[in-house]
Image (spheres, grey):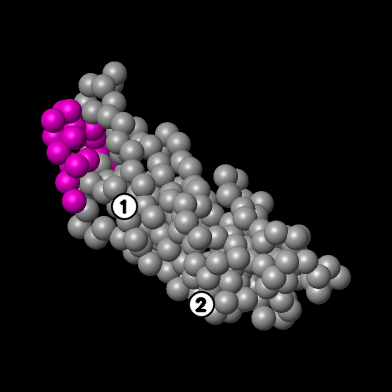
Amino acid sequence: MKKHHLAAVAGLCAAVVGVVLTPAAGAGGPKPLPQAQAQALIDAPAAVQSGSSTRAVSPQEALAAASLPGATVSVAPGLSLQQAVGLAPLPAAAATGSPVVRRLMVASSFTACSANAAWHEWGTWPYQQRITDTTYWCAVYGDHVTYISSSATGSGTLCGTDWTSSQLISGGVGYSWFVTRSRAGFSCPTVIPWVTLHPSHYEDIARNAWGSTSEVGSG
């Protein structure tokens, strides 16, 4: 009798544990809010609004970035992709042509490449919207840029990304600096399935031939 009683108690305890744990294990993430509350969180300032990470990369990695989906690529006039990142000899025409062309075609051994991911965030959890501008560029160090590959991505918790774009808005190859504008549109659901909010934003990032990066605009 005692053994039977203990087995029954153990079985009851296991059942209780299962009942207690199942809801926690099956709990979902954050749920959409009513429109007014969702809009307030979408428009609120982010706790941390921006960040940036830069590293030196090999010419091979910089070249591979030209093939990334959605990448916007710029190359110095008269140079192939391989020449612009320093992986191939410069053309014989480097000794001729205009002063601008000759300047762009200085020895590739001086070319250095960098990668930077710069992000800006709007809103607060769970309605935050983040744009990340990922750019690879090569330059004759301290003189002029020879190659740029930029792409934009969007991310968030409840807000999905509808579209992204990346474009060069100032400077560029042949200059000692350049500015890219990354844009994204978002879809942020509310508690009503057919009511979705659609904020959009941009960030402007400046980079230079010394490998430096700074945010110069957002909205």
Query: Observer-nearest residue: 122 or 175?
Result: 175
Q: Earlier in the sequence, mark 1 or mark 2?
A: 2
Q: Please state the horizontal and vertical placement of residue 23, each as a whole percent of the image.
A: 24, 38
Q: Secondary structure at mark 1?
A: strand
Q: Residues within 10 Å of mark 2 (few under 14, many from 20)?
A: some
Question: Pointers 1 and 2 in contact (CB under 8 A)?
Answer: no
Name the mark on residue 178.
none
Query: Observer-nearest residue: 20 or 159?
Result: 159
Q: Please state the horizontal and vertical placement of residue 171, each as a whole percent of the image.
A: 50, 60
Q: Residue placed at 39% from the left, 55% from the top?
A: 204
Instruction: Return the residue found at the far top.
Output: 194
Query: Observer-nearest residue: 141 or 116?
Result: 141
Spatial separation of the CA atoms under disc 1 and disc 2: 23 Å
Q: Which residue is mark 1?
A: 218
Q: Does residue 37 belong to the magenta stretch?
A: yes
Q: Residues within 10 Å of mark 1 (few under 14, many from 20)?
A: some
Q: Is residue 196 above or below residue 1?
A: above
Residue 92 appears in the figure: yes
Q: Is residue 132 above or below residue 107?
A: above
Residue 113 appears in the figure: no
Q: Secondary structure at mark 2?
A: loop
Q: Does residue 71 belong to the magenta stretch?
A: no
User: Would you say 22 lies left or right of 207 here?
Assistant: left
Q: Residue placed at 54% from the left, 54% from the top?
A: 150
Q: Which residue is mark 2?
A: 210
User: Would you say 82 lies left or right of 53 here?
Assistant: right
Q: Residue placed at 58% from the left, 57% from the top?
A: 149
Q: Is residue 70 above or below residue 85?
A: above
The magenta segment is: 26-45
